Image (cartoon, rainbow, N blue to C red):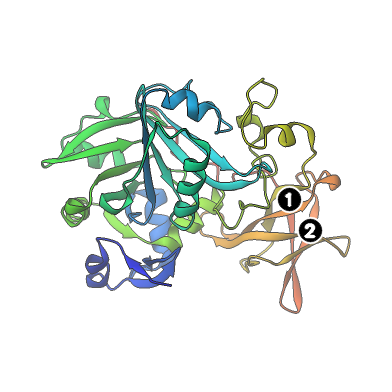
Amino acid sequence: MNIQNTPLYRKHISLAAKMVPFAGWNMPVQYTQGIIAEHNHTREKVSVFDICHMGEIRISGKGAAEAMELIFPRSVISQKIGGCRYNFILTDRGTVLDDLIIYRINNDEFLLVVNAGTKDGDLLRLKELLPDSLQITDESDFTAKLDLQGPESANILETLGIKKENLPKYYNWTKANIEGTEIMLSRTGYTGELGFELYFNTTDAEKIWDILLDQKEVNPAGLGARDTLRIEMGYPLYGHEMNTNTTPVEAGFKNLLNLDSSRTFPGSKLLRNEPEKKQLIGILLDGRRAAREGAEIFIDNKAVGKVSSGVFSPSMGCAVAMGYCISDLKLQPGDKVELSAGRTRIEGKITTMPFYRNSTLRVKL
């Protein structure tokens, strides 16, 4: 596979980042302070993440909203201009080809932010389902994306000239300017903390990265901390909690889909009528040892499922895991389980997610 570098590759190397391949990209997994320090700094102060590997697809043209309403399980027409909405691209079986965020730019224009590893498949699926009259443009190569995440993120943006009263509300976006660079600024993220995602032209990637890191309290954070942060919040990662063998209902998003309505979209009939085959659960483990992806889940010495993500949780002080079990078991919080770990097993119990419940995600500014 041809591994690509983000526009900030040189910056990461200069900061002695440990680089790893991820979804076809060379990405920083951690910097010199380490994953736990980066995780805690994000929870307590503010960090910046290079997320330039993500894909950006623009859909525009007369009737775009009406056409998209027919292919996405969550309503697109009801989105307001300036709003963002978490959504899914589904197969005809109702399973997840990708999870994404849709930004409504105006009445007939939308920006889709998709996962790097699924972008090409997403484009093919969108072109298959949408009419030829619409323009579908891959803007990934000239779009940079940085995530500023943590309880101090709004203060940092205010220091850079964006007044707090002008910052977008949760799951909304606005236009902003930082030292001459035009930015699409959304109050979204993947950490569970107050945070913002910044989209702008790749030619200014190093400039904006440097400006953010020049601010007091802002540290760089890599994919390692991003993973521990998202797992603590119970957020899915494509390829782990979601894939083409999993429906959004099985992943816990039934309430978002409004399956009782008359809306139709790929797989809608199956999602309405077929019972889910598996159930996503959260597991709080007794110690610090983490169970990894693929570890078997046991109840009363019987294998009932597998772990999809597992990690030591710095905020909880113990290991946590997410995994899928047979839905017929109707597992409940407090039920005891064991997870395989080599020749031994780790004891734990089922708990509701998120694991971490003291975040600043929805704090009012």
- Which residue is found at the position 41% from the left and 43% from the top? 113
Distance from Cα at disc 1 to Cα at disc 2:
7 Å
Q: Quadrant of residue 328?
A: top right
- Tell me if residue 12 comes above or below residue 132 in the rendering: below
- Tell me if residue 171 comes above or below residue 241 in the rendering: above
**In this orientation, does residue 234 appear?**
no
Q: Earlier in the sequence, mark 1 or mark 2?
A: 2
The residue carrying mark 1 is 350
Q: Residue 157: x percent and y percent?
A: 23, 39
- Tell me if residue 344 comes above or below residue 218 in the rendering: below
The residue carrying mark 2 is 337
Q: Which quarter of the rendering shows the N terminus? A: bottom left
Q: Which mark is residue 312?
A: none
Q: Quadrant of residue 264?
A: top right
Report if the CB atoms under discs 1 and 2 are less than 8 Å apart. yes
Circle 2 sits in a helix, a strand or a loop, which is it?
A: strand
- Which residue is found at the position 22% from the left and 68% from the top? 10
Amino acid at circle 2: Val
Q: Quadrant of residue 341?
A: bottom right
Q: Residue 11: x percent and y percent?
A: 22, 65
- Image-based side of 154 in relation to 84, left or right: left
- Image-based side of 304 in relation to 149, left or right: right
Q: Residue 154: x percent and y percent?
A: 29, 37
* Crowdedness near tag 2: few (<14), some (14–19) or many (≥20) residues, C-alpha within 10 Å: many
Amino acid at circle 1: Ile
**In this orientation, does residue 272 appear?**
yes
Circle 1 sits in a helix, a strand or a loop, which is it?
A: strand
Residue extending furthest front?
Answer: 132
Taking depth in this image into account, of 66 and 29 the one nearest to the observer is: 66
